């Protein structure tokens, strides 16, 4: 079944989780990235550009939502490992990853949506 990010019901997460397979060897890659420290921060959560804001606006998301998402990504998603570069995954892959990682990060649904909005805009504006 083909799904799009925009306007997709959030309950989909539960649905998507089932088919999501982990690449466990990335745990090691994550640890290595963790050592790289702040260098990976800019790559993982790049600053919001006008281009990203444009993408977000056309998806019905505000600059404020992106800013919140970026902050959440940089704080809540870095307690266990460093951030992966935005370019590494497609929007659909990010959706699945955020769905999965949201539980581990104790994110509220709204926060999860803010992170997703940020990643969506950052990925499309690349
Ligand atoms: C409680 C610890 C923890 C938190 C918090 C966490 N992660 Fe992870 N993450 C992991 C572990 C462990 C892995 C290694 C693969 C696995 O076990 O699923 C991983 C793997 C990943 C990967 C590599 C792809 C994969 O699934 O293997 C990405 C990308 C990722 N996390 C993104 C995030 C994002 C985005 C957030 C915030 C929403 C986040 N993580 C929060 C523990 C965490």
Image (cartoon, grey):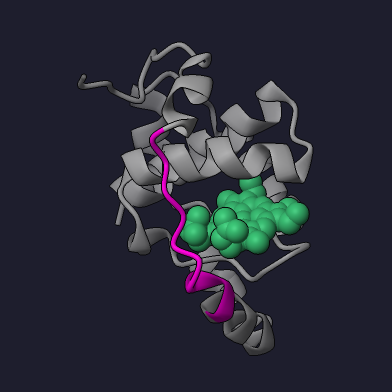
Q: Nearer the viewer, residue 14 or 67?
A: 14
The question of residue 99 being in magenta is answered with no
Q: Nearer the viewer, residue 32 or 66?
A: 32
The question of residue 24 being in magenta is answered with yes
Image: magenta residue range:
19-28
Where residue 54 sits, quadrant-wise, is top left
**Residue for point 34% across, 62% down:** 87
Answer yes or no: is residue 45 visible: no
Instruction: Name above or below for residue 101 compared with residue 23.
Output: above
The quadrant the C terminus occupies is: bottom left
**Residue for point 53% across, 27% down:** 62
Q: How many marks?
A: 0
Quarter of the picture for ligand 1? Answer: bottom right
Instruction: Name above or below for residue 46 compared with residue 54.
Output: below
Q: Position of residue 106 (x, y in %)?
A: 79, 37
**Helix, strand or loop for the magenta stretch, by majority:** loop
Where residue 85 sits, quadrant-wise, is bottom left
33 sits left or right of 76 in the view = left
**Residue for point 57% across, 72% down:** 27
The quadrant the N terminus occupies is: top left
Answer yes or no: is residue 42 visible: yes
Q: Nearer the viewer, residue 68 or 88?
A: 88
Q: Position of residue 30 (x, y in %)?
A: 58, 75
Where residue 59 sits, quadrant-wise, is top left
Q: Position of residue 110 (x, y in %)?
A: 68, 23
**Residue for point 27% across, 21% down:** 3
Q: Position of residue 107 (x, y in %)?
A: 74, 34
């Amino acid at each position: 079944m083909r799904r799009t990010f925009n306007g997709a019901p959030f309950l989909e997460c539960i649905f998507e989780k089932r088919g999501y397979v982990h690449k466990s060897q990335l745990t090691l890659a994550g640890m290595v990235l963790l050592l790289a420290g702040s260098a990976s921060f800019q790559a993982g959560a790049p600053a919001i550009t006008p281009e990203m804001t444009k993408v977000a606006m056309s998806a019905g998301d505000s600059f404020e939502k992106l800013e919140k998402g970026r902050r959440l990504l940089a704080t809540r998603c870095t307690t266990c490992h460093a951030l992966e570069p935005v370019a590494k995954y497609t929007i659909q892959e990010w959706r699945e990853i955020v769905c999965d990682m949201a539980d581990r990060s104790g994110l509220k649904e709204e926060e999860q949506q803010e992170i997703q909005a940020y990643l969506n805009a950052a990925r499309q504006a690349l």
